[in-house]
Image (tube, rainbow, N blue to C red):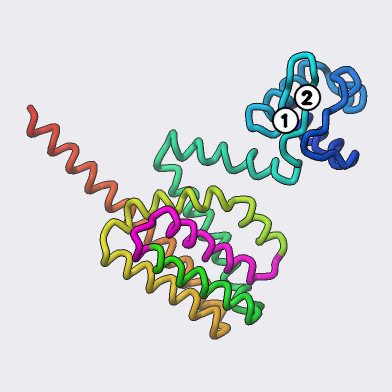
């Protein structure tokens, strides 16, 4: 871990310990260095890092102010760098899908064992909303409902660690769903296939079958991966053919 990252964690602990709220000013630089036991250069690097993410706001001559509570810091520190990686390297999204297979296979398993009637209602609500927004042609809301469907399953697992992991990565999950939908949902028959896969996940959870739920969600994610790879390959072939035609 970099020194600046360690200082960020120390700042977080200090802010939580002092019960600081959004808009509060942090102690002066010299005092912060003394309290945290760090150098000015390390502190400044950490503050600059947090300021660039919108968590702190530094005003010349006025000091540094808290813009977001530390409870939101981890999401920005983890999710945004991952989203940036996907932007820079489209193939990175397949790593995200692999991670989803591991994480969501577990959440679906425990959801099938532990889901309450309220949990099942919540899962079905988001399942219905995917189709509703899709019928309206509202891709943004459909993608959000899709991600919420998967999050509702995690919440039904009643495993606090799994739930926090899914919530912390929700923006990344939604971003990944949007990328997948641009490819896989572009044709109606693929939407029907994916809608049926979502139904099978939900149905397995409703009938309390953990292994079927795990297999259904993992199969769903693997299907998306295979379809996106296939579409990418077809697009690459078309681009090559187009270049050859221009020669």
Task: Say what secondary structure mark 1 lies in.
Answer: strand
Residue topped by disc 2: 64
Q: In which quarter of the image is residue 162?
A: bottom right
Q: Can residue 90 be seen in this view?
A: yes
User: Marks 1/2: CA distance?
Assistant: 7 Å
For residue 106, say whether it is visible. no
Residue located 80% across and 37% down the image: 12
Instruction: Work out which quarter of the rendered image holds the N terminus and state it.
Output: top right
Q: Mark 1 points at which residue?
A: 56
Q: Which of 93 and 25 is in front in this view?
A: 25
CB contact under 8 Å: marks 1 and 2: yes
Q: Is mark 2 on a helix, strand or loop?
A: strand
Earlier in the chain: of badge 1 and badge 2, it is 1
The residue lying at 22 percent from left, 48 percent from top is 234
Could you say where residue 30 lies in the image, as x and y percent from the top left? 88, 17
Establish if 173 lies above or below 222.
above
Main secondary structure of the magenta stretch: helix
Q: Which residue lies furthest to the top in this view?
A: 61
Part of the protein shown in magenta:
134-159
């Amino acid at each position: 871990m970099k020194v600046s990252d360690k200082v960020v964690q120390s700042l977080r602990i200090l802010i939580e310990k002092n019960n600081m709220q959004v808009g509060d000013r942090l102690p002066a630089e010299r005092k912060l260095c003394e309290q945290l036991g760090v150098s000015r250069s390390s502190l400044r690097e950490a503050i600059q890092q947090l300021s660039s993410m919108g968590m702190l706001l530094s005003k010349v001559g006025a000091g540094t102010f808290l813009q977001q509570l530390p409870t939101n810091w981890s999401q920005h520190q983890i999710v945004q760098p991952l989203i940036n990686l996907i932007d820079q390297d489209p193939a990175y999204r397949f790593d995200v899908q692999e991670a989803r297979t591991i994480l969501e296979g577990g959440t679906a398993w425990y959801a099938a064992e532990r889901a309450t009637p309220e949990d099942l209602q919540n899962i079905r609500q988001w399942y219905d909303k995917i189709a509703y927004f899709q019928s309206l042609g509202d891709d943004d809301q459909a993608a959000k409902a899709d991600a919420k469907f998967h999050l509702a399953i995690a919440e039904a697992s009643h495993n606090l660690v799994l739930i926090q992991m899914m919530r912390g990565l929700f923006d990344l999950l939604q971003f990944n769903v949007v990328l997948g939908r641009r490819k896989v949902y572009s044709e109606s028959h693929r939407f029907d296939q994916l809608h049926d896969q979502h139904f099978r996940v939900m149905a397995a959870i409703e009938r309390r079958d953990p292994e079927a739920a795990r297999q259904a969600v993992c199969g769903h994610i693997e299907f998306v991966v295979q379809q996106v790879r296939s579409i990418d390959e077809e697009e690459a072939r078309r681009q090559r053919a187009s270049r050859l035609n221009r020669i």
